[in-house]
Amino acid sequence: MRPSWHKLFSDLFVNPVRTILVVLSITIGLFAVGMITTIHLIIQKDMAEGYAQIVPPNILISVTNIDEDMVKNLVKLDGIASSEGARKFSARIKNIEGDWVKTEITARKSFLSPEIIQLKLIEGSLELSEGEILIDQFKYENVLINEEHHVFIELPSGIIKEIYLAGKSQDQTIGFDTGGGGFFIAPIQGYILMETLPHLEQALTFNQIYLTVTPENGNFNQIQKIANNVLDFLDENEIGVVQTTVHESATHPNSIYVNAISALLLVLGFLIVFLSSFLIINTLSALMQQQIQQVGIMKSLGATKKQIVSLYMILIFFYGMIAFGVALPLSRISAFGMVSFVASRVNFEFLGNRFLLFPILILAVIALIIPQLAGAFPIQHGVRIKVTEALSGFLGQRSAIFGKLALNKLRISRPVLISIRNTFRNRTRLILTLITLTLGGSIFISTFNVQIALKNHTSKIGQYFLADVNLDFNQLYRISKVQNDLKSVDQIDVVEGWAFAPSQIILDNGQAGETVRLVGPPINSEMIKANLLKGRWMQIGDHNAIVLNEVFQTNFPNLDVGDTLQLRVNNEETEWVIIGFFQLAGKSTGYIAYTDFDSLAKMNKSFFHTRIFRIASKYKNLNIYQQKSLANEISTVLRQKGYHVLQVEAGLSLLESTTVGLDIITIFLFVMALLIAIVGSIGLMGAMSLNVIERTRELGVMRAIGASNFTILRSVLFEGLLVGELSWFLSIFLAIPMTKLLCDSLSIALFDAIGLFAFTWKGILIWLGVVTFLSIISSLLPAVNATRLTIREVLAYE
Amino acid sequence: MINTNYSSLIMTRNLKKTYQNPAGEIQALKGINLVINQGEFVGIIGRSGAGKSTLINMLAGLDSITSGEVWVENVPIHAKNEDFLANWRGLKIGLIFQNFNLISTLSLLDNVMLPLDFSGQFNAKRSRDLAKKLFDEVGISEHIFKLPSGISGGQQQRTAIVRALINNPAIILADEPTGRLDSVTSESIMHIFEAQVIKGKTIIMVTHDESLIPRFSKVYFMEDGLIFPKNTSDKKLK
Ligand SMILES: Nc1ncnc2c1ncn2[C@@H]1O[C@H](COP(=O)(O)OP(=O)(O)OP(=O)(O)O)[C@@H](O)[C@H]1O
Ligand SMILES: [Mg+2]
């Protein structure tokens, strides 16, 4: 082998710590970029493709009643590809805690490769028999299953049935008709055959229509148009429509969360490429600094600039290749892991490990180009130095930022003085190290801020769910009777009857459009504190006044306070006056409108009666367990009095399930923060360790003239902390615009509007801890190492 | 400018070198006129700071010349760029330093063969044989696979000499090659040099050690950037 190649390999292997630091800093940058690009590439694609594969309906219509012939007839309508009828109803199921909780059961003709909505089998069999049930995977763990593999269903009449559990399945269409958040709030989902309906006291007719459109009619407006045709047809045939929902085949009900993650990834990805580049530049310039003397020797032996440059370029090429080899598989594994984590929580299907060319290409390009670019400057610099200077090894002697005078007067001990001088001695390098650390720190701090912003947002949503207990009955009860009967529960402060009704927006052309959930609390309800964007909340004396959520503002920007909104409620066209807009959880919640109980009860023709109650305790700020025990007490009292209770639920559990989607983004951000902390940490460790390694000789000289190991360690430590804390301080400021950037892209993805922002000391303090710890470790380790060498060894060290 | 003296190997004309220091300018060479012929063993002696190293650096093309001319084998060193000089140095000049300047991560053998690689004369088998022969001549052939940190100073300097000889240069420039060595070891290095002079090499050696004066065929004294020839009673090597 040629001696210059020998030199190359000896540079790789003779100083393994240094090689590892350099390779690690390139690897970690590549890893982060690879992971982010891979996730970004597959997460939206898998969600859309996996969803399309199950043949989701494009139109879902809830009706009061429809028979099979009529459902079949719908296929004859223009643009309809297939149709299926199903029956969906609520009952109660026993959970592992022994409580009865709400369940929604869907009955269909068959689950074996139906034309629409194919369930994915996870366990057991899709081939159901009469009297068997499938349970969806999402809340499967909550269901009580006995030794005979039976589950317990309580029917509206109060009769309890034991049903054989045939399997666990996944239904990606959960939440289809309730918006993105609907999936998380949805109760346990069961699936049975039509034949089983009579066993569960249900009529053998359909109340759900699933429709797909022909491929050429796949976009939203076309589907909407076809849906309107269908609605007209149903109207002509006097079939009462409760709710209509329209989606494109590739739009998963929870796509908003994945879009939000993707938006964050894009910004983070960009920042991380930037950070990684600095990390690489920093490490390589430190490396070159150590090579200057060797460059001098080689030049004196007749090496031309070109020869030396290519020698180091090849060395860097090797570093890049090793890093590429390590980072590529690692980033793949982590990205796939991350996507499958999100998939299982957001109800889409991760389509599995696969070959992806783009991340390989981008990593290869980055592995080849960034280190070479990063190395180019220090190499050129090293090569340009005069041979005589390079040989003498005295370099970078710029006038220190702190002049002798000022510091000497401060009576700082000389070793500390040396540390300070050292820190500022090599200004380029200091600046590079600071940029790397500051970038890493500020991204880390920003991800924490975004998490807090999301959390603040979540707790704002809590203001809409102030009740301690939510009570649902199977049938209407007189409100005053329920209030009276609950007087025996001491802890109760207020019992309110709320009205709910689905409705549809009536578009300008007179046709019914998207579904709006109408919520009717008592006009002076104490259990909701809305966050108003515009206008006002309801007041006593209002009639048919309506407050709309932000989704209306986004999709109907012309709507304003004082306008009239036409809604179809219970098949009747009604008019409402808009008095305000409020903010809820963003796009994912779908259209929600609040009005007062009486106005809505009038539409429902159920004056003084309702099925849904909200109860508040006398005690403030109950935790979820206290709420649950109150719920149990209420349930017992009501059952004794012969009420048909569907569900009694702690208030906080409703809030929790509403915000699960946001929590996933939070978890995701946390993982990213961790990743960045690692990138930043390795950057810090690399830079500092190289700084100290570089000074091994100088430390030896200090020892030779009588410095104790303690003095040396102290001065190195001081230097490391000085740089670390300085970068920490700077990153606080850089985190402000960065948080804004991340928050904006997140809130645009979630709410179509800028709104989120928070700044918290938490991330700043954690980063302070991380930086301090790392500064200590990464400066002490090599320094301890240096003090372990004998002075003779050190002085021979280059 | 035409060099008329074809027999002289190295020639300088009014060579000056000024360093820029934060403290001001330092005139390290104040007009050096030197003629050295092939086969001479030249000693340059002078006090610390006299400019000896500066002169060697100028002759080797290691640093820029402020003014004047340096001709080596009719090549105008003062007019050539760095890359040309690097190539030229690889082929024509063997450099030896007081602090050896071996590459610490390479074995002695690799250290020695490195210049061949740069000059493009590397041939695995032939280079290895050549290196071994030279190691043999300086008497350290048993150490050639060791790293520089594993051998003594004298052995390191002998390695550096082998490295300087590997390209078979016409001229060897040695800046205090014995400065860090004891007298016995120094003596062995001088023997090696003398053997090379006999083979026809030209050696210019800087030293503090006046006791070495009788060993040179020609001696110059340097003081304060100027050079003075000393009559060495025309002692010729046998
Ligand atoms: N890179 C430099 N920058 C500034 N001044 C320099 C530089 N190199 C040498 N000098 C100055 O030039 C003068 C000659 O230095 P030189 O190294 O040639 O002396 P020397 O004769 O080799 O001394 P020594 O015997 O100590 O090696 C000295 O005054 C020195 O301080
Ligand atoms: Mg000198």
Image: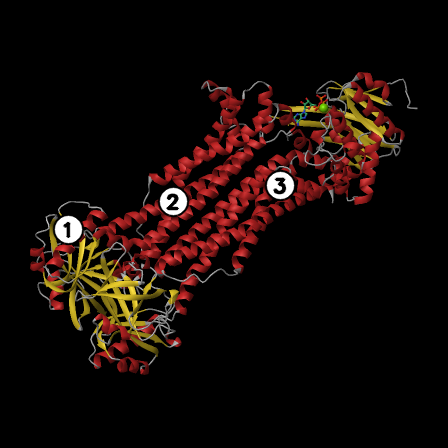
**Residue A171 seen:** no
Output the chain of dot 2.
Answer: A
| Structural distance between the alpha carbons of marks 3 and 2 | 35 Å
Q: Residue at x 89, y 29 (%)?
A: B198
Q: Residue A379's mark? A: 3
Please name whichever residue, A405 or A26, is drawn nearer the observer in this view of the structure.
A26
Alpha-carbon distance for marks 1 and 3?
Answer: 71 Å
Q: Quadrant of the C terminus of chain A?
A: top right
Looking at the image, which is closer to me, B25 or B88? B88
Amino acid under disc 2: Ser
**Element on which disc 2 rests:** helix
Image quadrant where one finds the N terminus of chain A = top right
Query: Type of residue at label 1?
Result: Ala
Q: CA distance from mark 1 to mark 2?
A: 38 Å
Frontmost of labels 3 and 2 is 2
Quarter of the image where one finds residue A484: bottom left
Foreground: disc 1 or disc 2: 1
Q: Residue furthest top?
A: B211
- Circle 2 Cα neighbour tier, 10 Å, few/some/many (<14 / 14–19 / ≥20): many
Amino acid type at circle 3 is: Ile
Q: Position of residue A425 (x, y in %)?
A: 54, 30
Could you say which disc has been placed on residue A446 in the image? Answer: 2
Q: Is residue A212 visible?
A: yes
Q: Which mark is residue A76?
A: none
Location of ligand 1 given as a quarter of the image: top right
Q: Label 1, on which residue?
A: A616
